[in-house]
Image (spheres, rainbow, N blue to C red):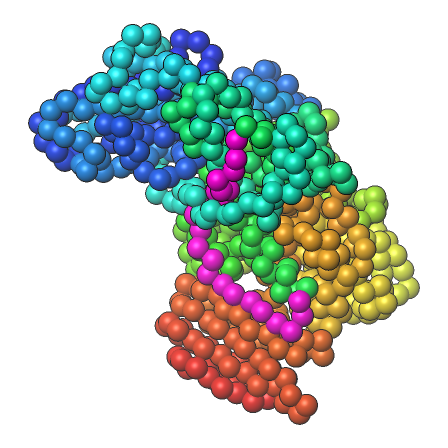
Amino acid sequence: MTHAEIFKNAKWIMPQEDLSSAIFRKTFSLDKKEAKITICGLGYFILYINGKRVSQDELVPAYSDYIKRDKEKMNLLYPLKDETDTRIYCLQYDISDYVSVGENVLGVMVGGGYFHQTDRKAEGNMDYGNIRLCYIIESENDEIISDTATLYKQGFIKDSSLFFGEKHDYTLFDYNWNTISADENGWLTPVISAETEETEMHIQSFNKDKVIRTLPVKKLHDFGAYSVYDAGENITGYAVVKCENAGENVKLEFAENLNEDGTLNFHSAGGDWQKASDEFLTDGKTTVIHPYLLWHGFRYFSLTNNAEPVEVREIHTDMAITSSFTCSDDTINWLYKTYIHTQLSNIHSAVPTDCPHRERLGYTGDGQLCAPAAMLTLDSQEFYKKWIQDIIDSQDKTTGHVQHTAPFSGGGGGPAGWGGAIITVIYHYTKYFGDLSLAKKYYKNMLLFVDYMESRCDNGIIVREEEKGWCLGDWCTPEQVEIPEAFVNTNLYIRQLQMLAFCAELLGENADSLYELASYHRQCVKEAFAPDENGSFLNGLQGADFFTLYSGVGDEKTLASAEKKYSQLQHFDTGIFGTFVACCVLFENGLADVALTMLMSEEKNHSFGFMKNSGATTLWEDWDGGHSNNHPMFGACVASLFESVLGITQKEKSVGFNNLTIAPCKNSVLSFAKGHITTAQGRVEVEFNKTANSTEFTVNLCGNFPSAQLEYDGKIYPLSEGKNHITC
């Protein structure tokens, strides 16, 4: 929709000077008590009517590629030529319960968010410009719009930085700023921003961020001037503190880890150069204080001893957990629980981020890896519909190149493992939710990406991406990455061609050329990376054989070589893609014992068990925990717990689980497993218990499943609605 279709004659207004936060107010009259508002403040905003906060939504609007930016001023580490799309999301609220007949006051607090970044440039200069606001209040006989009659000034938030924190000064602040009785001396007239009117506008109907829960804190150390506190787990949100005295400078700092002496260790969240902190100058009136327009990623925080903590509030995009999993192994139980917590901690402003502190970007690599697990375990359909649009927006409309972050904010990556999200995320969305609309809408975009990938090849092998840019393959292997980027990208691309062919057939399109293209690239891989006499590629380096089996390049000899190596190794030596691919291949080929043994491993610097035993409450970026301690990407293998261990899957051409098959893997490792997912057809719950001579299955179907059956040990058992008890 256009600006005029949503906001009519309302104008985008912004401060005359460069501010990271400001407050806006406007008095208006209504002759009816029924009214609605359409509003957007960039980067984030909080709306008040007559002094009352209108919604408990946090961190709105959703993060997007807001407006066009000057490429030359981005100062990226690589040249950017792509022409991409932009959009802005707006919020609508019924404010009938907040307004009165007669005079009213609108108040809006606006902070920089992702829109106005001036202090973090590790990925380039991502600043879109000064903060701004647009709104229209509509009642039966009245329309109140944002214009230069709206006033602004800097409020008690003197600095609002998404990455570094907020600074507040409550002294001399007029607490009536958003009420009729405010003193309007010192308020200023804003200026008009015409450029914002040129971008596409949408009403945000999908998930918003919320305060999800509150946590108590524990005091660990008193260092005289300040103390260090523990929230009990790694989370995203902020600390709420109390100070009753006026004129106090209260300061907090946040970190994931502690040094041996009990002080904060900032390394994993960006180091000393990117410390997250909040600072408050008190006035004795506001005694309970906290930031308003950001979140931190942390477990520990320090607080000056002139204040005391009240609680910690956890914030992320509000998304229901629609799954459960438990089994006879503690490490696998920890993996499921920790993945869910990590994934939710990395969904803010309706974008799946890589980490919640250092980068906070929608990396398409991490995002496409975790999409299957998140779609199976969380109520995420509307969320992914939005993020797929971000991916489409980040595609160059001429070449088909897809950026490494969506919305685009710089960042490194590679052609298949990152850009390939344009195919993989749409494929999984279609497969799991049974909604063909996005595959249909963006089919040409996916084909354009294929054209781009073909232009990145020499002799059928993907060897480059953008000139002077990134071209990563696998990432975060336990040792230095040695598996060739070209090998990884080409094998992943072949699998993506198969995914696109699946979508093409669903849409009634001819998929023959896609299958032929996949076959051609398989032959090229065999020629460029010839297997040895045992069918192994690159001597099985860092999961190389798994990549070829995933793409269909490898054969039975390759599988035997992989089985031999990892049966002996019994832990991962793979990166973020190799770990996911390894689990897929092993489970799909009847080697569940090998996969489960690796998932259960406690090998130092190579396993989930090592993370668990080290006290991790979120998944690490690196197997050794050397960097960020809150990255969901290794949790992508959680999808296998449902599709293979519990066996909740569907027939080859099925979507939305309309042809449900329960096919648990045979294994000698787990004696018990139980869990459920919520599909488009309804809830599916599976439990198995092993005895000396049999396996007892309980399959509970709650919904409308047109076709459902249990497949185990070569036999097929029809399933009906309700509980099904089967002994094999």
Foreground: 292 or 576?
A: 292
Q: Is residue 335 visible?
A: yes
**Residue 316: in magenta span:** yes
**Position of 222 compared to 248: left or right?**
right
Picture coordinates of residue 537 (x, y %)? 84, 57
* Main SS category, magenta section: strand
Where 106 falls versus 684 (above or below)? above
Q: Is residue 400 visible?
A: no
Say which quarter of the image contains residue 359: top right
Say which quarter of the image contains residue 715: bottom right
Picture coordinates of residue 297 (x, y %)? 58, 39
Placement of the N terminus among the 4 image quadrants: top left
Picture coordinates of residue 173 (x, y %)? 37, 17
Foreground: 254 or 493?
A: 254
Residue under the point 14% across and 22% down: 103
Residue under the point 23% across and 38% down: 94
Residue under the point 54% across and 17% down: 70
**Position of 565 compared to 35: left or right?**
right
Residue placed furthest toward the right? 533
Placement of the C terminus among the 4 image quadrants: bottom right
Picture coordinates of residue 237 (x, y %)? 51, 39
Foreground: 288 or 597?
A: 288
**Which region is colored magenta?**
307-330
**Residue 156: in magenta span:** no
Residue placed furthest toward the bottom? 693
Residue under the point 48% across and 40% down: 310
